[in-house]
Amino acid sequence: MAATEPPLATTAHDPFDHPPRSRTAARAAHEQEQPTRRRHALLGRSTPPSDSELAAPESAALPPYALESVDRALRLLALLPEQRRLRVTDVSRELGVAPSTAHRLLSTLAHRGFVTADVNTRTYRTGPAFWALTTAAQPADDLSVRLRPHLRRLSERVEETITLIVLDGLFCRFISGVRGARPLRTIVRVGTVLPCHTVSGGKALLAELPPRKLRALFAGHRLLPMTRRSIATLNELSDELETVRELGYATNIGESEDGITAVAMPVRRPDGTALAAVAVSAPTTRIGAVPTRALLDPLQEAVSRIGDDLLAEASSL
């Protein structure tokens, strides 16, 4: 259930600008597009396909065996990547259906996690199930391939599961990982998408954003809890991010899954901006709630080596 905090855009007090508290206290334009562009947005196309690539024009009649409700749901999914937010009236107009039908379609997709509803603005946006599906369908990108040797070496050194995480709006995508060698270990989450404020790598990357970008990112949204330990308010998140900046690393202590602790640090581009985050995760019963130098030092060395390699690559171009 979403937290009851009012949306950031309507609060008089800006949570990302208030003075930080202690770590203990912290824990306590809709656009019209060409139909071909819209229909193929799920495929990551930046330009409309040629006529020979089209399976069928959007206005073509459905074959006799097709289910109209499924067709509508798929057309709705194709609308999501190109528009930041959709209202019931937007869906009704785009699909040519009654508002009541558009509402049922959105409600069904929200139930399965393909869209996320914002009760304050009465809009819908892409949800974690949508990104998990599209990410799983894509081949490993260049970044995950280039950094995998570093992840493997870190995993061998600490004998724990290592993951590479990137920020994707309000969510985090796990794009690569190496499982730990111990019999009792955490799973590799490649392809998984989780709310960024519940994940150590997500918090490590959020802490790199200036207040202006944080305000824009969370405007009109409430924090979705994953467990009872998840951060529930924007004020708590602001305090947590301040702590992350002070410590140089972020933690996740049962915030995305009970019994799991993770610690993460950002990977930086040659210009100093964050590119991704590397996280070490393990059962809380083994590593506790406070990361030790036995984990932090190898993690710091790994992200430093990655940064050196990225700098060397950029210098050779």
Image (tube, rainbow, N blue to C red):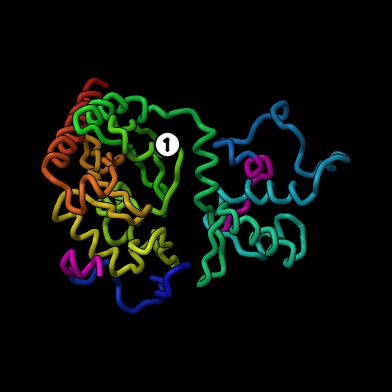
Q: In this image, 41 relative to 152: left or right?
A: right
Q: Quadrant of the C terminus?
A: top left
Question: Vertical placement of 195 versus 267: above or below?
Answer: below
Residue annotated with mark 1: 190
- Count of numbered tags: 1
* Residue at 36%, 30% in the rendered image: 144
Give the quadrant of residue 25: bottom left
Q: Is residue 57 magenta?
A: no
**Which residue of the protein is positioned furthest toward the bottom in this rendering?**
12
* Residue at 70%, 62% in the rendered image: 104
**Which residue of the protein is positioned furthest toward the right in this rendering?**
64
Q: Position of residue 75 (x, y in %)?
A: 69, 48
Mark 1 Cα shell of 10 Å, populated few (<14), some (14-19), many (≥20): some
Give the quadrant of residue 163: top left
**SS for tag 1?**
loop
Amino acid carrying label 1: it is: Val
Question: Vertical placement of 300 versus 18: above or below?
Answer: above
The span picked out in magenta is: 20-39
* Residue at 23%, 32% in the rendered image: 159
Q: Position of residue 296 (x, y in %)?
A: 15, 42
Q: Position of residue 293 (x, y in %)?
A: 11, 42
Question: Vertical placement of 74 versus 23: above or below?
Answer: above
* Residue at 23%, 67% in the rendered image: 26
Q: Nearer the viewer, residue 211 or 1?
A: 1
